[in-house]
Image (cartoon, rainbow, N blue to C red):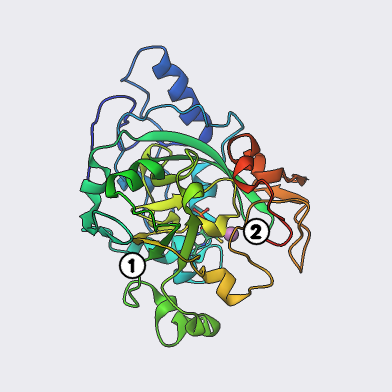
């Protein structure tokens, strides 16, 4: 698949990448050396596709937005997923997506209120930008969380290239719709009957100023490698101050429009999932509390932070808004 550069801290295929080694490697490289790390550890199999088969991304720029909290392991991040196109179980995406999802070739359609609409190949979409590492907290609306070292490009930079018009007030994103690749989109819901009744594709949206905030990321990898299928290969959104369902996977369309988009979960259950979906410990889900969360791998729960801890960067976007109403 696409490889930008293979300098920096890219590793031999056989290098295992768990949290400890990944951190160690980053420190090591900051010290100036770049090669000759041990290769004696066996590659870690991640269900369908061993991570060793995913290409390294090359050098990534560091970001001031990264947290220094402990990372979740590669295995945790790639084996406990929500990607309903492949089933509703947390293990379903890892078990099914790597074999089914075809990410090559891939293109993204830019449409609606933009000066430069058109179909853009994946490599062209990325071509001009420097990949950054962004270590973000991810807080699912189901009250679990992880810390993930994403690799990607700021959404704002991509949006600017296509020159939205003054009528572009919102951005709508769509996931691939292909029942051959995504079992839940088949007539029988791929064995999950209630999924058959959903309207595909999965849709998400952001207000334009949210999309232009520097925290919003188009991610193409994690742990320094290409995006695993189950995490939304080859390109997905990451909006760290919002519940995980806003971070739409495997994007094939970015559409600019004047009206607020209707996002998939809002359509399914409008009283449970709003458009904004900002992480907010004070606004409970109708069926459970959002005050606390379980970090995957932890035994004890921890307090959930307002805006998932990103208020300094984004709280101003919601000044004067009633966050209980615009949940
Ligand atoms: N297309 C699509 N995108 C999706 C989902 C989905 O089911 N389909 N699930 C969302 C939810 S609920 C969460 S919590 C995150 C999970 O991302 P991860 O599996 O990479 O941790 O993806 C989001 N993006
Ligand atoms: Mo989620």
**Residue at 40% across, 47% down:** 218
**Residue at 41% across, 61% down:** 173
Closer to the N terminus: mark 2 or mark 1? Answer: 1
Disc sitting over residue 100 in the figure: 1
Q: Report the residue marked by disc 2.
A: 141
Label 2, secondary structure: give it: loop
290 relative to 124, above or below: below
Q: Ligand 2 quadrant?
A: bottom right
Name the image quarter holding the C terminus: bottom right
Q: Nearer the viewer, residue 198 or 17?
A: 198
**Residue at 40% across, 76% down:** 183
Image quarter for residue 140? bottom right
**Residue at 71% across, 62% down:** 325
Residue 52 x/y as whole percent: 34, 43
| Mark 1 neighbour density, 10 Å: few (under 14) some (14–19) many (20 or more) | some
Q: Confirm or reject: label 2 Cβ below 8 Å from ligand 2.
A: yes
Residue 312 x/y as whole percent: 63, 34
Tell whether 127 sits left or right of 48. left
């Amino acid at each position: 698949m696409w490889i930008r550069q293979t300098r920096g801290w890219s590793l031999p295929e056989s290098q295992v990448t768990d949290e400890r080694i990944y951190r160690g490697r980053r420190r090591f490289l900051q010290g100036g050396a770049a090669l000759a790390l041990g290769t004696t550890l066996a590659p870690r199999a991640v269900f369908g596709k061993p991570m060793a088969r995913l290409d390294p991304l090359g050098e990534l720029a560091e970001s001031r937005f990264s947290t220094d909290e402990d990372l979740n392991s590669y295995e945790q991040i790639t084996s406990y997923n929500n990607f309903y196109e492949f089933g509703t179980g947390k293990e379903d995406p890892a078990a099914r997506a790597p074999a089914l999802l075809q990410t090559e070739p891939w293109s993204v359609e830019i449409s609606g209120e933009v000066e430069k609409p058109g179909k853009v190949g994946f490599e062209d979409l990325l071509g001009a930008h420097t990949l950054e590492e962004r270590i973000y907290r991810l807080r699912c609306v189901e009250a679990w969380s992880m810390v993930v070292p994403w690799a990607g490009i700021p959404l704002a930079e991509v949006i600017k290239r296509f020159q939205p018009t003054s009528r572009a007030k919102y951005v709508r994103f769509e996931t691939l719709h292909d029942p051959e690749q995504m079992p839940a989109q088949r007539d029988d819901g791929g064995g999950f009957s209630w999924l058959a009744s959903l309207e595909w594709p999965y849709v998400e949206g952001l207000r334009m100023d949210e999309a232009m905030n520097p925290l919003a990321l188009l991610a193409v990898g994690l742990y320094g490698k290409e995006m695993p299928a189950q995490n939304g290969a080859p390109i997905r959104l990451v909006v760290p101050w919002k519940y995980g369902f806003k971070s739409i996977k495997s994007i094939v369309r970015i559409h600019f429009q004047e009206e607020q988009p209707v996002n998939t979960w809002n359509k399914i259950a409008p009283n449970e999932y709003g458009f904004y979906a900002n992480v907010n410990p004070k606004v409970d889900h109708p069926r459970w509390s959002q005050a606390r969360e379980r970090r995957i791998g932890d035994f004890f729960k921890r307090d959930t932070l307002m805006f998932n801890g990103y208020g300094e960067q984004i709280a101003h976007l919601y000044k004067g808004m009633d966050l209980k109403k615009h949940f």
